[in-house]
Each structure stands twice: as structure tokens, then as C-alpha cells.
Image (cartoon, rainbow, N blue to C red):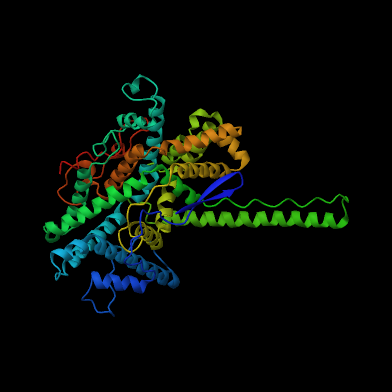
Amino acid sequence: MASRRTVGRGSQIIFHGPRTASARSGGSIASNSTAHAVLARRLLFPHYPPSKPLPPLISLSNTHDPTEEGDKVHDTAALKALNDEIYDFLALAVRGFILPWWGKITPRDREFPQEVMRIVSHLIKELEVRMLVADVPYLIANAIPTLVTQHYLDYRTAESKFFTSYATGLHPEQSDSLHYLFHSLQPHMAVSPEGEVDPNYVRQVIEHIMKACLPPEDWDAETERTIIREIVVKIVLEDAFPRLSQPWFLQKMALELLGSPAESAGPAAPISSTGWTLNALVILFLSAVQAVSGFAIAAIAGIQACLHVVAEVNNSPHYAKGTSMKVDLVTPVIDLVSEVLNARESATMTAILSLLQLVCGFFAPFLNRLIPYLFYSRMHPSMFTKAVSQGKKVLFPNGYPGPPAVNPTPEEQILIREQLEERLCSLVPPIASKLLFGPNPGMQRRTVRGIIDPLGSSKCNVHLLVLILDAILVCLFPELAVGSAKGVMEMPTPSDQERYTPLNSNNSPFDTSNILED
């Protein structure tokens, strides 16, 4: 539920957990690894000896190369925690989506959940292999920023055409009609003009993934394959997309990522008016010496750290993998910042970003090696553990599939947006805020609203989600971008010109229109 608390000049919404239409009893989520293992063993591995550990689903062997013994022990524990979370998630899914109806059909048959688990384990392991060989840094630093930039550009273009002859037949007094203009700029075979996703598109995507990942004997098991496919379709279309496309949900996520504002410092100590004394001069001199020596030590440490990072980046085997070395990974991020801040309307911001782009272009060869190095060196099993745990809490709030969560009221959604606007304004120092957002508070508030508005339509956000899904599929399954492949990963990857689309184009840089043709 959400409660309202008065803070300073206005109100603030405090979320105490998911708001649901009703509370369903019948179990609770286990909070320790022992409970995870008990549930997974009972449903998925009933014949496993209690002393025998469950087979690992995820290894992530190529993402981290620990050199110290403590790092190896820590990675082993983190991988075990990740596998426990995945097993618990799968056990809850089987208990919530399969057992209620399968037990009524064949009460004595307990082997079907094990067969489903065997197919799912094949899928997870194959997806892990594909993720380790895929060019994920290109996806994160080039593809997704390009899609988000295009989304902002097309939304603002549709908004500028809303009161012109381009909107003939629409109702200008209804702001909900904007998504029709946006759809004409970003047509996609999976999304209708009303912002609804075609279930057959998602089914065909899942079918291709299963066909590419499963061995022939498991692919021929049509019953198990269909059940897994429909469960995933339900999660994507009824749980994930409707929630991720909501503007208030994206704003609430942004608030959680930004964190609480820092506490304001107390009043400064009054300055003594007794004049300069010998003690004050000595203290001032020693403070100056300490500041200079501290700065020198920090500069030396920074130079040594930079030299160490440069040596590690040049000797790292990760940066040469995929197409990251052939594609610019810096310019799409700068273009995204420029479009989000709408820099074309500010000469100061345009000059700053042009200078930044010039400097990054000079260091582009090193930055294109640094970004993959940072990605692979920072990727750790604990990151995936948190994601699986959060998904488990959302989908199975009480150990079973929960009822649809109730959206905040319109008043609460307005307060969430106001909180985000105030947080963005307070995040930037006053001097930088005048350069980034405008010279006066009115222009600063208008710039901040312009940052949030392009993500303010759920029907337009669906296009962005589908395009990001396409980008992830093309990254993991490149054969989808070039047509039907005879075998997995046998087709050549697209050239650089095929993988990049200029920002002024209305087409997506990822063409998956041939998915349904399979």
C-alpha cells in the first residue's frame, strides 16, 4: 500500500510494498537457501538424495577470472546463491502454473514437472552459452541507446505534429490520440496502433528460441514445449509488458535508482571577528600545506590507477570479442544524452556536448576497449541473483501467482512525477543546473518535464519495449536478423552499415520482420 507523508512544501508517497487487489494465502516465499533446496527437491528432483547437491544451471565461467583464493570462494558462493534463486523461481512457477491443473488430470503422475524442468534447464544453459559469446557491450552501449534516442525523437516529432494537418481524423482535445501519430513514425508488425502486442509474435519468438536451444528429442515433445511457451507468453504479455510500459512505474524505478536526496548541511559556523592572530595564521598555513599535499597524493594515486587500468584494458581478452571494436560505443550514448536533454534548444548545451564528443572522438579507440572491459570485469553472479529475486517477489508475492497489482490512483501518479521532477532538479548543482536546464527556475522546470514527457505514454512505451526485445533477440540469435539459418550461429553477422541506422531514420536498426515467416 502507499501512504502520504507531508515533507517540506508538499506531499510524498511512501510505498510499503505491492498493492494488490486481494491477499492470497497458502504459502510464503522461503528466505534461506535450505528452504529453496527443499522446495526445488520436492517438486523438481524428488528422487535426488538429500546429501547430493542439485546440478548447477548457471556457471558464468567466462565472465570473471578470480586470481585470489578468496575471490574464488566468493564466486562459488555467489554462483550457488544464483542457482538456488533460479531453482526456487522455477519451483514456484511449476507449483503456481502447472500443478493446479495437472494434478486434476493425472493425480498420480509426478514425472511431468520433472520433464518440464529438464527442458527448461536445456534452455537456460544454452541461453547462457549464447550470452557469453554474444556482443553484449554493443547491445548496451550502442543498440539500446540508439533505440531510446529514436523513441525520444519520434515522440517529440509526433507531439509537434499533433495540432497540424498530420493529425487529421484524430481528436486534439484527447491526449490519448498521440500514440496513433507515434505509431505512424515507428510501425512494427507486433504492435497495433492502439499499443497492443500481438501474442502470435511473442509465440513465434519463443518457438524460435526453443528450436534453437533444445535438442531434437526435447523439441519433439510438443506438449511440454507448448506448456512452457504459453507460460512465458502469459508472463511477458500479462505481467511484464503492462507493468514496464506504465509511466508511473518507470518514474518510480527512476526514483529508486536515484535514491533519497542528501541531507542539507547545517548552518555554517560564524566567522570570528577578533582579527588575525598568530594561532590563526599557523592553522591557515598548516591547512594549506595539508590541502596541497593531499591533492598531490591523490593526483599520484589517480595517475597510477589510470596507468594500471590502461594496462589491464590493453591486455584484456574481452575487448576483442564481437563487433565492439568495429562500432563506436561512445557516440550513441552522447547522442542519447543530447536528445534526452533536448540540447538543440540550448546553445550552451550544444557547445558542451560538441566539445565532449570531440574529446571522446579523440580517445575513441581506447574507450571502445574500455567499455567491454568494464562490462565483463563488473559482471558478477550477484547482479543476476538480485534480478531473479526481484522478479520472484513481483510474480509470486505470497509463494503463488498473485492477483494483478492495483495501479496507483491518478493523484498518487501525479505525486510520483512531482517527486521525480524535484529529485532531478536537486540532483544537479545550481551552477551546472543553469547550464544544463536553463538560467531560471521556470526554464529548468520545463526542461525537466521535457525529459520525463517522452516516457509518459504507455502505448508509446510499448513500441520501445518491443524494439528492445528485438535488439536482445538479435544479439543472442543473430540468425533472426538475416533470415532463416540452417544451424544455430552459422549465418554471418550483419555488417556495420546494416547494424547501424542514423538517428534521423524512422526505421528500427533491428529488422525482425521475418520471425513470423518461420
Please tell me which residue lies in front, 477 or 88.
88
Image position, residue 101 (x, y; %): 18, 61
Residue appearing at x 17%, y 66% in the figure: 103
* Residue furthest to the front: 22
Image position, residue 246 (x, y; %): 38, 43
Q: Quadrant of residue 144?
A: top left
Residue appearing at x 72%, y 57% in the figure: 290
Image position, residue 136 (x, y; %): 34, 50
Where's the C terminus, which quadrant? top left
* Residue furthest to the top: 165
The tally of labels here is 0
Residue appearing at x 23%, y 46% in the figure: 202
Residue 383 visible to an observer of this rendering: yes
Residue appearing at x 41%, y 72% in the figure: 73
Residue 322 visible to an observer of this rendering: no
Where's the N terminus, which quadrant? bottom left
Please tell me which residue lies in front, 104 or 489.
104
Q: Is residue 383 above or below residue 349?
A: below
- In this image, 16 relative to 265: left or right? left
Image position, residue 238 (x, y; %): 28, 49
- In this image, 290 relative to 467: left or right? right
